[in-house]
Image (cartoon, helix red, strand yellow):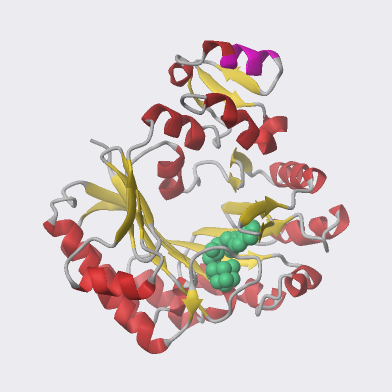
Amino acid sequence: MSNKGIYIHIPFCKRKCFYCHFVKGEYDAEAIEKYTDALVNEFRIKANANDAVDTVDTIYIGGGSPSLLNEQQVSKIVTGLYKHFTISTNLEFTIEVNPEDVTPAKLKALRNAGINRLSIGTQSFVPADLHYLKRTHSVQQSLTAIEDALDAGFSNINIDFIISLPTQTQKTLVNNLSILEKVHIPHISAYILEEVEDGEKKNLRDEALYFFTLDYLNSLGYIHYEVSNFSKKGCQCRHNLKYWKNKEYIGVGLSASGYEKGLDYKNTENLEEYFAKVNAGCLPRAEVNRGDANFRGIVVGLRLLEGIPVNHFAKYPGELELLLANGFLIRLGNKIAVAPKKILLLNEILTYFVPGS
Ligand SMILES: C[S@@+](CC[C@H](N)C(=O)[O-])C[C@H]1O[C@@H](n2cnc3c(N)ncnc32)[C@H](O)[C@@H]1O
Ligand code: SF4
């Protein structure tokens, strides 16, 4: 039995960014305090359901804006995790932070609480991009957050970029990414801006800017290992690898998803319902599905540039040959991967493997 991960969602932000589709409400000191207690209750419910017998070796606190949690709330969550789960000593423990929310004291408190990986929502080091995104932080606040994080003892740091913005050109991208030559950051996420229109996610993809980013990061020594993720050697995100390698993880909090015992589940997105269910001792699940495990493995696994074992395609010999012959998929030893230049066509490629189609 392999070790599990835990994802914990913090659904509060000071302001809602117009392009963001993650579940969040506006920050409210009272609600976040009540929510922290509810999370610990949800840990207890999982433990009582005897779901917490496996060792946990990755924890990821994401959002929303987890950096809105105060020191006592972080400490309550960490104490609750250790009380209700078996936590490995070889733990990767990440928290997402907004650059404008962190101070040297706050970062030290996070580090002292046992958090050893930071994901900073920098988005861009070009003022015009931040202005387009209507972010409330400045380039300087991102640089200060990185410096303060290093001083606080974080060496495992990710920074988020959003690419393919209307304000971006190859020239401004060079200004943006060249900052990485001066600061030691082992992990980069570069997301193509995705907007939601009429309930549908729309990728505003500019392929040229995406592939330019790939080449530029590669020239700085970052290995492209997942559609949107890059790392220096040995610094891949262990938690997110669990998603892409089809491993089990526990989802806790409003709207959190999990995958355990072959079941995909998702918690409710309604905060009042979440409080009511958890405080009544019930798991706050809105959906539970047992999908096709092999298809699930293909969907998540082909996001990795290293690919997945060829046996995943045993049911699809014709489709596999066609996609190989046309250069959409490639063989890497006994694995099948998406051809790097076709990675943005992943969704189209996956349609060939939908069960029953
Ligand atoms: C959900 S946010 C949480 C982190 C933090 N609240 C922040 O914004 O800095 C994680 C990351 O998702 C990315 N993101 C959010 N909405 C996006 C969108 N519509 N398209 C592409 N990336 C997006 C941003 O890079 C952001 O840093
Ligand atoms: S701060 Fe982060 S989570 Fe909150 S709305 Fe903006 S992008 Fe989304």
Write down which quadrant ligand 2 falls in: bottom right
Of 240 and 24, nearer the camera is: 24
Q: Is residue 335 above or below residue 73?
A: above
Q: Is residue 26 left or right of residue 1?
A: right
The image quadrant where one finds the N terminus is: top left
Q: Quadrant of residue 159?
A: bottom right
Of 199 and 218, nearer the camera is: 199
Total count of labels: 0
Of 160 and 243, nearer the camera is: 243
Q: Is residue 2 magenta?
A: no
Q: Residue at x 48, y 71 (%)?
A: 24
Q: Give the magenta-colored segment's residue range.
A: 319-325
Q: Position of residue 8 (x, y in %)?
A: 36, 62
Q: Residue at x 37, y 81 (%)?
A: 32
Q: Position of residue 45 (x, y in %)?
A: 17, 62
Q: Is residue 320 magenta?
A: yes
Q: Residue at x 55, y 41 (%)?
A: 233
Q: Position of residue 86 (x, y in %)?
A: 19, 54
